[in-house]
Amino acid sequence: MQQIIVHIDNNLYALFGTFFGLVIVFCFDYKAVMDKGFFQGYSTIVWIVILLQATGGLIIATVIKYADNIIKGFATSLSIIFSSVISYFILHDFAPSLFFYMGTVFVLTATFLYGWEQNKIILSVNEQARI
């Protein structure tokens, strides 16, 4: 029952967001939308960015559903790194700095250590259960 309520809430949020977004678009850009269409100026790069953002949102929602908030923070950090790498290699509009590389190393190290400690604890509990 709770899951149905969440889906209803999500649909209501989407409905209100779409409604108010369209009101703003038509208040400020009515003539341009009527002349050239709603998706004027959308290039391949824009569609790639939309796809990356939508995929990232779905992945974060899945992580929160099945994991805790700490892992959500790691997933968000990794998605920023992934988006930056995509931006560098495909879109060619990102120049990583020394701080980006340092941050990437810190995030990857923290993610590894967080997962490694849990595995170590699980292994030690399983080893104690065998004894």
Image (spheres, helix red, strand yellow):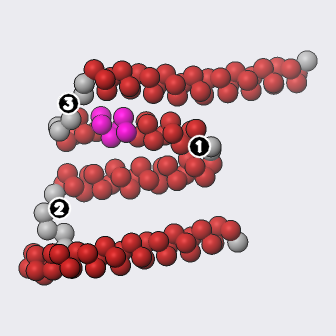
Amino acid beneath label 1: Asn
Q: How crowded is mark 2: few (under 14 residues within 10 Å), some or many (20 or more)?
A: few
Tell me what residue is drawn at x 21 percent, y 55 percent: 46
Numbered range of the magenta stretch: 80-85
Q: In which quarter of the image is residue 23?
A: bottom left
Tell me what residue is drawn at x 63 percent, y 72 percent: 4
Which mark is on residue 69? 1
Q: Does the magenta stretch include residue 34?
A: no
SS at badge 2: loop
Image quadrant occupied by the C terminus: top right
Give the answer, above or below, for where 75 lies relative to 51: above
| Residue picked out by circle 2 | 42
Q: Is residue 84 magenta?
A: yes
Tell me what residue is drawn at x 30 percent, y 37 percent: 84
Whether pointer 2 and pointer 1 mark residues with C-beta atoms closer than 8 Å, the reply is: no
Disc 2 or disc 1, which is closer to the eye? 1
Residue 87 on image: x %, y %: 25, 39
| Residue picked out by circle 3 | 95
- What is the magenta segment's predominant secondary structure? helix
Q: Residues within 10 Å of mark 3 (few under 14, many from 20)?
A: few
Relative to 79, is 10 on the left or the right? right
Spatial CA span between label 3 and label 2:
24 Å
Relative to 81, is 3 on the left or the right? right
Spatial CA span between label 1 and label 3:
30 Å
Give the answer, above or below, for where 109 lies relative to 48: above
